[in-house]
Image (spheres, rainbow, N blue to C red):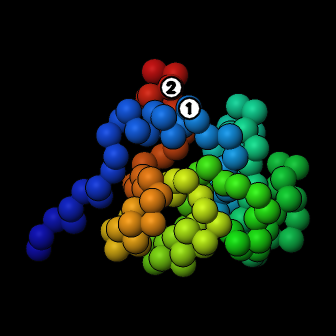
Amino acid sequence: MNPVPEPVNPPDDVIRDVLAGMKRVAVVGLSARPDRASYGITRFLVGRGLEVVGVNPALDQDVLGLTIHAELTDVPGPVDVVDVFRRSDAVPAIVDQAIAIGARTIWLQEGVVHEDAATRARAAGLIVIQDRCLYKEWLRLING
């Protein structure tokens, strides 16, 4: 059995620039459960003073004081980073929406990889980061 190839990611200086320059982040797959990574990372981002919007069609309540949108295309205004906490098979539709709203970066959390969708996103001009935790990368590259 062939090993799964490592996802193609930009170099650390590009990831550092994404982290340092982001002002508005859409968290796709935000959970209302405090024990979930999406909740903890959203809390971290809000605590850093970033504007964060949540995306989850299954939620009908605010989370961490944030309004939740059903779809990424429902988010008004510009989005710097789309942070994805969904399974890899959901990524193509999220990439299509990220392209449609003119997002700058799509960030797929640890364990989330979809190289075909990533190739489409790159062709549309987005920076693509896969299989990396935004929080861990922040600690490594910004607060390291």
Q: Which is nearer the eye, 37 or 127?
A: 127
Q: Quadrant of residue 51?
A: top right
Q: Is any part of residue 114 visible from this angle?
A: no
Task: Kindly identify which residue carries mark 2.
Answer: 142
17 up-or-down from 52: above or below = above
Secondary element under disc 1, as helix, strand or loop, is: helix
Q: Residue at x 12, y 70 (%)?
A: 2
Amino acid type at mark 1: Ala
Tell me the quarter of the image containing the C terminus.
top left
- Left/right placement of residue 3 relative to residue 70 reads left
87 up-or-down from 82: above or below = below
Tell me the quarter of the image containing the N terminus.
bottom left
Q: Residue at x 72, y 38 (%)?
A: 50
Image location (x, y in percent) of residue 118 = 39, 66
Mark 2 is surrounded, within 10 Å at the Cα level, by few (under 14), some (14 to 19) or many (20 or more) other residues, namely few
Q: Is any part of residue 126 visible from this angle?
A: yes
Image location (x, y in percent) of residue 142 = 50, 25
- Left/right placement of residue 77 relative to residue 136 reads right
Which residue is most to the left?
1
- Left/right placement of residue 23 relative to residue 75 reads left
Task: Kindly identify which residue carries mark 1.
Answer: 20
31 up-or-down from 34: above or below = below
Of callouts 1 and 2, the N-terminal one: 1
Image location (x, y in percent) of residue 20 = 56, 32
